[in-house]
Image: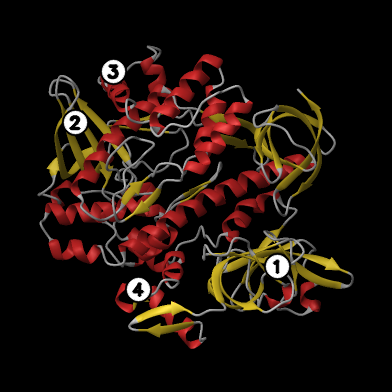
Amino acid sequence: MKEFLRSLLNGVSQREISATNLEVLRNLVSLNAVSEHKGRFYLNNGFVCGRLDISSNGTGFLMPFDDRFKQDILIENKNLNNSHYGDIVLVKLLKTAKKRQSGKVVISLKLANETSVVYTKFFGSALLGVNIKTGLSTTLKASQKSLKQLPVGTLLKINNLNGEITQVLGNINDPLVDDKISLAIYNKSSEFSQSSELEAAAWGDEVDALMYPNRIDLQNLAFCTIDPVSAKDFDDAIYFDEKRREIYVAIADVSEYVSPYNSIDIEAKKRGFSIYFPHIAVPMLPHALSENICSLKPNVPRLVFCFKISLDDDLNVVKEELFEAIICSKRRYNYDEVDRILNDKQTDEIGWIKNLYEITKNLRKKRLLNGFDFRTNELKISLDEAVAITATTFETDTPSHQLVEDCMLLANKAAAKRIRRGVFRNHTPPDLKKIYNLLDDLALLGFDFSYQSDLANLIRKIQAKADEMGNRDEIDKLIIKSQKKAEYSSENLGHFGLGFDRYTHFTSPIRRYSDLILHRLLKAILKNDEKFYNYLLLNIEQTCASLSELEREADRVAFDFIDRKFARWASLNIGKIFNCYVSENQNILVAKLDDIFVGARIFISGYTAPLLSKIRVKITEADIASAKIFGKVVKDV
């Protein structure tokens, strides 16, 4: 929607507007905010569109989509018109003698969230709801008598359109409710509609190979899956034919079970991605599919969409074959087991893992001549039966992770070559401003580099210097912060980080809707069905934009849950001092815990320090509602 609203500044014709945005246009015309001139629609003077921010005192600030506004627009609380934090809104500018531009919200064009989460709290004798995200209090559409029957701190889900209470989630003082809070904030659900559950269950538990005579039968090949220990859904299996130097990447054939616009598909498109908490997963597909008939479990037949990738003696790809098949995985490995095999501490039961690793290790070397090897550490937390933190670790890439990654990259690249338009995974080069900011931050750490137009070469030089100084992990964090986020798009723009001209996501249709769309497109190409291919591309730009946003939301849900767990831990450790390092230092200083636990964010005011500085921090406050920890620096290290 942002791009559509931007287009109104220079005029847009009706034929260029998607069906969803046509409804928005009609609303804008009826409000006299948009006018038509010579077949094009323009935003009228005196109106501006943007995203709404709301401070803790209830004052609003519009972040305009119009670049002519160099400063945000002030919106007093009385002029918010029941709009919410993060909404995309239409604002009418107000005439004022003050220098600061102000306005009032006319209408919310797109809600940031359909629902809000509040907890009950007394203000004097009145029981109000306090918004979990903004901290703003609001009256509730229920009688004070009925509200007072509930314990103080009761968590309620509110419909943002009409203010109605739709669900009682639990109580904010109960640690067992944290996943419900994180899901509800972003209007996610762990429950599936009855119709989608019934559709999924109708496929049963077993695959009868006789029902699929046109599929290539690969059940005799020694495929295996390699996943985390806790994984329940297995998207991908691999097999290596050493004599022919052929790598098979077999992916769960979800599109065989989920047709466009059936109940499962509608819900999967709305979810976009599976969400993973440390103790549970909220899948994109019903469990009957994600953990059963689609999942490539060992020793049972499963339907797959498979790439067979042939390499020559110099490890160049010489042939990429794509076909529908049936496999029977011979072994379910976890990453730790494969690492033990590669270190000669465990037997390679299927016989080809070590040889494939040697191949992928060399493929990786070739790939990194153009791409980057960022040492990303993913935070993992362990919980006890009371869902309290017991341990934290940073999970790093091991040889087993790299083996799987390079096989999946081969398949993703091969898939991207086959589509002219569809669902690409793009990662564009970083903005010049962010690169200069990165160089400034690095200079404070003793890295003296000047800007050069060959950004890939510049980044590799910085990484080489970091290797020499022994702080590669920390420097990679700064480089990653300077990068743009990868996004989905209907058009190919390449992938800067990987160094690929074309890239897409093919390998995870159980947990990513983008991959499911791609599978359908590829099958249409295999069948030379141009009509169905074009049908699948209807509104594809809007779908890709939605997927990029849903991906960010899925990440936010998972991060919010972790923040909540850290906040509960911090509330039991007020006044204690811990080792930390500075992870952000622009608007407010943020320290990351680096002690008995790692990764918790601690917000610190009134203090400045260079990035990555080591400091000792006393925890002064933990707000469980907002999932924030506050502290003060007691010592530089």
Task: Tell me if 490 is positioned left or right of 73 in this view.
Answer: left
Instruction: Point out the frontmost of discs 4 and 1.
Output: 1
Of the image marks 4 and 1, the number of the one nearer the N terminus: 4
Instruction: Point out the frontmost of discs 3 and 2.
Output: 3
Q: CA distance from mark 4 to mark 1?
A: 34 Å
Determine the residue positioned at 20% across, 23% down: 315
Name which quarter of the figure residue 26 lies in.
bottom left
Q: Which residue is mark 4?
A: 17
Determine the residue positioned at 63% across, 69% down: 84
Determine the residue positioned at 57% across, 67% down: 87
Q: CA distance from mark 1 to mark 2?
A: 70 Å
Give above or below for 152 relative to 143. Answer: above
Of the image marks 1 and 2, the number of the one nearer the N terminus: 1
Instruction: Point out the frontmost of discs 3 and 1.
Output: 1
Of the image marks 3 and 1, the number of the one nearer the N terminus: 1
Q: Front-most of 557 and 346?
A: 557
Please give the label number shown on residue 358.
Answer: 3
Give above or below for 2 relative to 328. Answer: below
Q: Secondary structure at mark 2?
A: loop
Of the image marks 3 and 4, the number of the one nearer the N terminus: 4
Which three-letter amino acid code belongs to the residue tagged 2? Leu
Instruction: Point out the frontmost of discs 4 and 2.
Output: 4
The answer to whether residue 520 of the structure is visible from this angle is: yes
Q: Which residue is mark 1?
A: 100
Which three-letter amino acid code belongs to the residue tagged 3? Glu
Determine the residue positioned at 13% across, 20% down: 243
Count of all numbered marks drawn on residues in the image:
4
Task: Tell me if 127 is positioned left or right of 172 in this view.
Answer: right
